[in-house]
Image (tube, grey):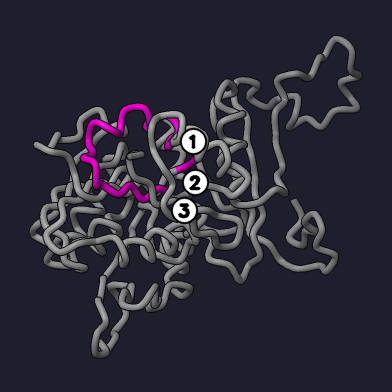
Amino acid sequence: MDKDYVCGEHSDIKEWHQIKATVKLPELDDLTAIMSMLSNNLMIEDYSDIDLKTCYGDLIDESILNADKTVASVSVFLPCEKNYNEAVDFIRGRCAEEGLSARIEVVGVNEEDWANSWKEYYKPLHIGNKIVIVPAWERYEKQEGEVIVTMDPGMAFGTGTHETTRLVIDLLERYTQKGASVLDVGTGSGILAICASKLGAGRCYAYDIDPVAVRVAKDNVESNACDNIVCEQSDLLKSVEMLEGGYDLITANIVADIIIRMTPDVGRFMHENTVLLASGIISERAHDVIGCFEANGFAIVERMEDNGWCALAVKKAR
């Protein structure tokens, strides 16, 4: 792939980062769905259907002839001025939630740059009326009325810069009641549980299927001195602790298909006044998610959108 790449409707030549994820062939459709959440301009590499019996070998690139036919790759291209690490973390987190064992690489960026250079894009971020997300390596002077959340996302998704995270944090400011019990499903870096804690919530339980995310979340919880948060590993709701009477607030910043999958089971963790904040929904899939909620006895009480992403506040229908 050339360094200069014209992507879809973009007519100006500019530099791009190529983020490439590789999975086993049967997982290609699921990976493509995840990558399409970042861009509709994808490059898919699937050589499994090349029939050498009907092709002239000397007309096919040797790298294709020798390619592993049991795997497939999907690449997305982001402008160089964008924070590619946030996209990498997003892909990694969503693949973990879907159970995909993806190998992810940023083409043209060496490992040391990948591990460190993304920090230059991550600065103190104001969300809603109170929350300020401050990178652990940045100095920030707190202003009156602000709620400071210190984050080092490490290798987990959740720095606050992605629309899905901003949407649900904005909702958290309005729906977090003092002393409320909170369940965060797919916690990533722990950012939502920490925000809820700092907004006055009581006991918070944060779960993720990815053990790396759980470790990162625990580190962030400790650095924010939020001793009311418990971080554990769970595949969605399978290992979630059941609170007597249900949780007061549930957050799920995941993807549409996973929200749909957990919807039939989430009601047993809720009481009649519980609010569920669902985010990570690409706007084109909002209708499917809303339909699933309504079919399972829930009502949408609020809907927010930002740059093609949707977040919902949901309660049990009366």
> Which residue, as the protein is rendered here, is positioned at the far front?
318
Image coords of residue 96 (percent x, y): 40, 37
Tags 3 and 1 touching, CB below 8 Å: no
Mark whose residue sits in front, 2 or 1: 2
Determine the residue positioned at 51% across, 44% down. 104
**Kind of residue at badge 2:** Ile
Check the picture and name the quadrant holding the C terminus.
top left
Q: Which residue is mark 1?
A: 102
N-terminal label among 2 and 1 = 2
N-terminal label among 3 and 2 = 2
**Magenta includes 291?**
no
Q: Which residue is mark 3?
A: 311
Residue 134 seen anywhere in this rendered image of the structure:
no
Q: CA distance from mark 3 to mark 2?
A: 19 Å
Determine the residue positioned at 64% across, 39% down. 74
Q: Which mark is residue 91?
A: 2
Q: CA distance from mark 2 to mark 1?
A: 9 Å
Determine the residue positioned at 61% across, 29% down. 29
Q: CA distance from mark 3 to mark 1?
A: 26 Å
Mark whose residue sits in front, 3 or 1: 3
Does 29 sit left or right of 121 as displayed?
A: right
**Kind of residue at badge 3:** Ala
Depicted 262 relative to depicted 53: above or below: below
> Which secondary structure lies at badge 1?
loop
Image coords of residue 154 (percent x, y): 33, 58
* Magenta residues (range): 255-278
